Amino acid sequence: MNFRSVAAALAASVVLPFSMAQATDLEVTHWWTSGGEAAAVAELAKAFDATGNHWVDGAIAGSGGTARPIMISRITGGDPMGATQFNHGRQAEELVQAGLMRDLTDIAEKEGWKDFIRPAGLLDSCTLDGKIYCVPVNIHSQQWLWLSNAAFEKAGIPVPKNWDEYVAAAPKLEAAGIIPLAVGQQPWQTTLAFQVILVALAGPDAYQKVFGDKDEDFAGGADMAKVFKAAVDARGMSKGSNVQNWNDATTMVITGKAAGQIMGDWAQGEFQVAGQVAGKDYTCLPGLGVNEVIQTGGDAFYFPKLTDPAKTEAQGVLASTMLSPATQVAFNLKKGSLPVRGDVDLNAANDCMKKGLDILAKGKIIPAPDQLMSADSLTQVNDLLVEFFNTPAITAEDLQKRFAAIVASAD
């Protein structure tokens, strides 16, 4: 295949700085291993392979919490991969400060990333001391409730339109042998559910005060009490949801064993792989049907410094390819996330993705927790909420007091 045919295959409107003589293998590590995630990452690999280089897949089973320590250990231990996934925000901050990550500013400026990456905060999250160190590839929002239409039909009740209706439906769902709320046992899942409830019931400003401003008094105050009461409701509704992985919990919703799941928009990938149709087989409620906002977190790729010039050049090709219009559309349609480019055609988006795009267009956005609070502080929140969801004796008041103490010492 010659250079011109490769460039034509990309159809990406991006000039890629490579030559076929320097094409090489590049290992890419990530934690995308569920059915929907695998379908999405295959689109990135296909686009990169079309440049004449080769994507060597370094998938690490489990969640980001499992994968990140492995990735970090390899980079700090002198065995770096070609590229690695992290979430937007502060997860790779120490690696950047240690001089272990490649500066992508020259590529970003040449290709005008600031002109098309939206919202601007995504690129800001990749920037440290004025230099850009990562490629944001999508916008993932946590703020979704996914509901099985079949489960509510079996229980003889209408699909709820908001959180209060959902909680009220729980007894009839249980009577029909259906678990009201599926929650996996990975620590981040209980934290995610809590954060979504917080934003929905207390509002985006309350979320900012807690995770952004680290306001201990507000976290422990009366305005937040309803959030912790709702967390108790969620804990009760999830009783019997004995699965570990988030996608196993999603499968419970797909099969009607559970009525719903609070999960990020990446759950859409699992519904798509199962052949389910938004609006027909399942219902999505952004912001739990209460506060419709989009969290502007998501996934980004960092590029550890390498000594092999050919692999270094391939890193630049991959960075460009990930942000090309064609790749952005193909990847995000499979992933269930929103593209970071504001200039691509998404007519093929399903009903739920269109809801997300509409909310984004209205500017109803909030930053991800990783953009506001350090990884160590978020780990403390994770640990507390895992304990809470597994210990019925912990009351709403106990949870609020302990949570406020973490907020007080957070950085």
Image (cartoon, grey):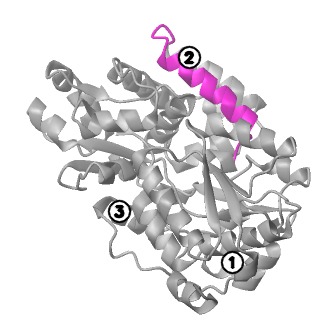
Residue behind mark 1:
114
Q: What amino acid is found at the position of numbered circle 2 in the picture?
A: Glu
Residue 122 placement: quadrant: bottom right
In this rendering, is residue 210 above or below 48? above
Q: Residue at x 24, y 53 (%)?
A: 275
Q: Which mark is residue 254?
A: none
Q: Residues within 10 Å of mark 3 (few under 14, many from 20)?
A: some
Q: Residue at x 53, y 28 (%)?
A: 186
Which residue range is magenta in the image?
Answer: 372-394
Q: Which mark is residue 355?
A: 3
Quarter of the image that includes the C terminus: top right
Which SS class for mark 1? helix
Q: Residue at x 61, y 88 (%)?
A: 2
Nearer to me, 270 or 24: 24
Instruction: Specify whether 306 is left or right of 187.
Output: right
Question: Is residue 216 something that shows in the picture?
Answer: no
Residue behind mark 2:
387
In this rendering, is residue 218 above or below 342? above
Nearer to me, 98 or 282: 98
Query: N-terminal of the two: label 1 or label 3?
Result: 1
Q: Position of residue 396 (x, y in %)?
A: 49, 18
Quarter of the image that includes the N terminus: bottom right
Reply yes or no: does residue 378 show up in magenta. Answer: yes
Reply yes or no: does residue 281 show up in magenta. Answer: no
Q: What amino acid is found at the position of numbered circle 3 in the picture?
A: Lys
- Alpha carbons under labels 1 and 3: distance apart: 25 Å
